[in-house]
Image (cartoon, coloured by chain):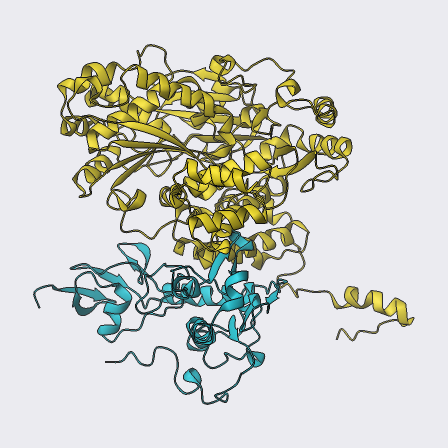
Chain colours: A yellow, B cyan
Amino acid sequence: MENTVKQIVEKYNTNRNRLMDMLIDIQESEGYISRDAIATLSQLLEMSQADVEQTLSFYHFFSTKPRGKYAVYLNNSPVAYMFGREAIKEAFEKSAGVRFGEVTSDGKIGLFDTACIGMNDQEPAAIINNMVFTRLTPYRVRELVKMMKEDKPIEELRKESFGDGKNYLPSLRSMVSSNIRRKGMILSDDYHFGTVLREKLPTLSPEGVIGEIKHSAIRGRGGAGFPTGLKWEFCRRAKGDKHYVVCNADEGEPGTFKDRVILTEKPELVFEGMALAGYAIGGEEGILYIRYEYRYMKDYLEEVLHKMRKEGLLGTNISGIEGFNFDIRIQFGAGAYVCGEESALLESLEGKRGEPRDKPPFPVERGYLGYPTIINNVETFATAVRIVQNGGEWFTQFGTDDSTGTKILSISGDCMFPGVYEVNWGFNVEDMLDMVGAYDVQAVQVGGPSGTLIGPDEFHRTLGYSDLSTGGSMIIFGKQRNLLRDVVVNFMEFFIDESCGSCSTCRNMTQVMNNKLKKILAGKGVANDLKDLKEWGRVLNASRCGLGQTAANPIISSLKNFRPLYEALLQKDKDFDEGFDLEKSVQASCSYVGRVPVFNHH
Amino acid sequence: MSNLIKFKIDGKECMAEAGKFIVDAAADNGIYIPTLCNMKGVKPKGACRICSVRINGRLMTSCTTPVADGMEIESNSTDIQDLRKSIIELLFVSGNHFCPACEKSGNCELQALAYRYQMMVPRYPYEFPMKPVDASSPRIIKDQNRCIFCKRCIKTIKDETGRSYFVFRNRGHKLEVVLDEEMGKTINSATAHLAMENCPVGSILVKEKGFDTPIGKRKYDKEPIGSDIKL
């Protein structure tokens, strides 16, 4: 074991900034990260053991205890439950003989819950040793467990056909489906990869590229909506020996999976966009930071990069442009939603806990390792290529005045055709529901848990930065769903689990509010509780990052738009909550001593 | 003198050197903005959020935001004061803070802030979480019941090679500040005392001696926290 750790540390040049890679490699080769491994790591990297552990313990997929020869991670998003997760869970527990959170005594099978794995259009789904199994049924689960007990290689567990699109490729061989249901400029097949790097860039200066991006008025596709052209310009102007291009593929917002589809079907477009950005800001290194849930794409993406290097689209003097050098490496996360926040992502890239940084300074000034860095979403890079190909002016004809271009939506939940749809900004929710075949809709979660939950009276609203802003997650709930019990609590628990814990507000308030929600669900709520929830939620505005600031949105937004659901649960005859019931509390002790309590109520 | 800039806090004209953090610039102008995780001479982290102020309609932490020329800062408004009080209350309910039995009583910044903000009963329900006390080090007691995750010990208590004695473990609601087991065994007396001093609450205590200064004669027993900042 000690030798394995040594080799792994050497593979990354004993560089502390690569601690994430080292931990991932150890976890994958040993099945866990033992005390001995931590001791060896800390010695070689000259860190304290606790310091190694503070990074390790931050990430969901790292463990100091064995997770089993087969580690099963079953998605626990609301949509998974809507499609039978309860039965799947039961089938796993029954046939494996252990509960979730445990490993079988022979060390073979470990069962674990995990937050949305980006498969909402093919739930219930689980990751087993980095392979994604979709559309699970109890029968299939029993079969899987039987094969695991027989020590079958993971490849032999696969009985399904490969998914659609490129999922059949030898380097991917995945059961995941891309489910592209509507194509626009990004998902269309009419672009020949490399055209912009080969034909456009030799005629355009870096400033010219930024000019086109600015003219297009494209805003960041990750959800925050910062103007991309400005970001690139700021970074180009920022002083530093190096400039970095980082692609954020950590899509962890429950209900979103479009980056998975873009990276499966159009990875060349994303990498070309990163190279284009490198040219624009004067950077030579790009990093794709991708969530660990998509580990199954590793070989495939490496192969694409390798091919691009061979074709001269990455490397030195690209397209014959003197001094245009650019290459990309892939960095995996290890299970932390907050790392989708750009500054937390940078911390994680540097091998640390994914705690958001204080801003200012912004990453364009001080980013990865302190150098000026742009961080853009997968979709933004892909779109940038089409903008430079056709010009910023061309791009503005799509979408609306304040939201130009197209948006790729991840649509899931109660509808006939869940999947990925590329639409022009300005699309309204009503049309969207008719497009995907969603009938008897009670609510739509726009933009994931950190977004808004809207009901039919708001379905006339349009998708765009000035109305319903979204990173693309759209979850549809039919009339049969219990929104508070099955959706809001699930989302609140998601935020409680995923908070980095740094700010007092997000660390504690989410818990306080969720407790109150549970109290209301238990039938113990009073009218004052609703007032409290509304007021208390405001405290989260003082959090450092977007996660913290929106962490109570599931409650705040459902309380605003679905207030009658809350009111129906309140105790009608009380406006004050005593907190506890004296008669009930002394009942047990009274029965022991054989006395009847007497209360003077008046 | 050339790099002096003008800015306003709650309408009051102030002056400071450009680049100074708002909380220090305010103190120089006789205005107290409460802090808890912040420490003089240590890189701020903006963890407790108590020093939040409003600039251009946005809440910002004044310990991490530098003043800029012409900046208009809102600090003393009712809602910001209530936000600060809320955060103090949140810290009380999410830990187990029993002041009368705590060695740090009177020297505790959380307690002092609660007095200053006249907290009577927290508006949030007490959580009474189960938290351990780590007394494995021969010199230090790390009482998790009282920890408020300010990060001061993590940032300031280091050995000669720069390694931190204290680190974070886990995340979110399960977050803990822990003492490295090995390093805790060999921590010297001076470092242990510094750790206790730097802890704003009673989460890090030095073993074997307590109540050196009697209660009633401690730092915040006579004057509220922030009283040193006056015109």
Residue B216: x and y in percent read 48, 89
Considering every residue shown, the one lying at the far front of the view is A3
For this rendering, which residue is in front, B92 or A139? A139
Q: Can you give x and y, in whole percent of width and height, for residue A359 in the image?
A: 30, 51
Q: Is residue A51 above or below residue A126?
A: below
Judge by depth and name the residue closer to the eye, A397 or A255. Answer: A255
x and y, in percent, of residue B70 in the image = 16, 59
Quadrant of the snapshot with the C terminus of chain A: bottom right
Name the residue: 31% across, 42% down.
A368
Relative to B154, does residue A300 appear above or below in the rendering?
Answer: above
Image height of B76 relative to A561, above or below: below
Visible in this render: residue A451?
no
Q: Which of B200 and A506 is in front in this view?
A: B200
Count of numbered badges drawn on the protein: 0
- In the image, residue A7 lies at what x, y percent? 47, 37
Residue pictured at 33% horizontal, 65% vertical = B42
Q: Residue furthest left?
A: B2
Residue at image point 22% right, 15% down: A198
Q: Is residue B100 left or right of residue B58?
A: right
Q: Can residue B107 be seen in this view?
A: yes
Locate residue A285 relative to residue A442 in the image: left or right: left
Please tell me which residue is depicted at 53% across the width and 83% down the height of the picture.
B210
The quarter in which the N terminus of chain A is drawn is top right
